[in-house]
Amino acid sequence: MKICRFGQNQLGVVEDDQVKDVSAALDVLSPSSYPYPENDQLIANLPQVIARIKSLLPGASALPLASVSFLTPVANPGKIVAAPVNYQKHLKEVLGDPNLHHNNQIGEIHRVGLFLKATSSLVGASEGVALRKLDRRNDHEVELAVIIGHECNNVKREDALKYVAGYSIGLDITIRGPEERSMRKSPDSYTVLGPWIVTSDELNDPSALDISIAVDGELRQKSNTSDLILGVAELIEFASAFYTLHPGDILITGTPEGVGPIEPGQTMIATIEKIGTLAVVIRAA
């Protein structure tokens, strides 16, 4: 199932070239009170939501896909976990270009580890990317995004995919410079997620998906998730060895070679096999 958020916080299911409005399924969520849960309540209750969705679909109103403004499909992630230099060719690319590494610590992901992005950086496709620090290079990075569906801690890789709610397309926008990754990658709108989540029962093997991004029609990055240094299961094992992952946490898995600069006025089109296409307009902040 392809589940999206759109318009005025509406819930939808994507079928072919239509979005079915199933917002009434949100009624299964229990009201929360302070202190609020450390997770996204939609993702935490996804099985119940999906059961309600199935009952609503036959009578759901439909909108043309092209008319829908997509919001981030995860509204309240507890954290965004990111994997640096997780494609071998991208590692060589960064090490060989001072405009990319700026003398920052660059190395194998096993050694440098993961990093966190601010949840305030998260937007959906319709919100676009608002670039800051226009005197410096801002780059696109397309990534497979993994949505955690169940709380997990110290998970072994052979069990890791059991904890996945689904997959989406992620854009990790980056300001080049000497600061730590978490700072340069966390301005508002520098994490794009969408346009929807493909649930893990529909996409149960993320290990060999074609992934690409074009900017104004120019193909910039093209690879396959089979080239990841650490695959999805290994990344969940790696991350959960350091901290508990909660429903709605987002894991972006790293970008392949071909990163390049973006400017206001351009449009990015990112595509991942079995998920779909994410179109994002760039503007100045």
Image (cartoon, rainbow, N blue to C red):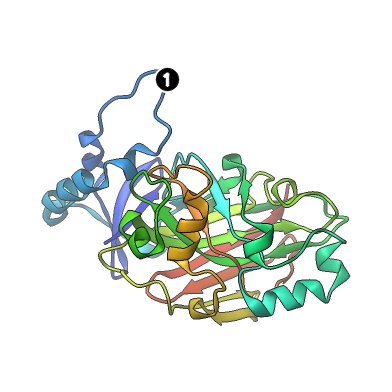
In this view, the residue in front, 235 or 208, is 235
Residue at numbered disc 1? 35
Q: Position of residue 149 (x, y in %)?
A: 34, 49
User: On the image, which quarter does residue 163 sit in?
Assistant: bottom left
Q: Position of residue 123 (x, y in %)?
A: 54, 48
Q: Residue at x 50, y 55 (%)?
A: 251
Q: Is residue 222 above or below residue 131?
A: below
Residue that extends furthest to the top in the rendered view of this protein: 34
Q: Position of residue 159 (x, y in %)?
A: 33, 60
Q: Is residue 54 above or below residue 28?
A: below
In this view, the residue in front, 209 or 17, is 209
Kind of residue at badge 1: Pro
Q: Residue at x 21, y 48 (%)?
A: 47
Residue 49 seen from this side: yes
- Describe the element under mark 1 as helix, strand or loop: loop
On the picture, is 68 further left or further right than 113? Answer: left
Within-10-Å neighbours for mark 1: few <14, some 14–19, many 20+: few
Residue 258 seen from this side: no
Q: Residue at x 33, y 24 (%)?
A: 32
Q: Is residue 223 above or below residue 239?
A: below
In this view, the residue in front, 72 or 153, is 153
On the picture, is 165 further left or further right than 182? Answer: left
Q: Residue at x 67, y 80 (%)?
A: 89
For the N terminus, the image quarter is: bottom left
Number of numbered markers: 1
Q: Position of residue 264 (x, y in %)?
A: 74, 60
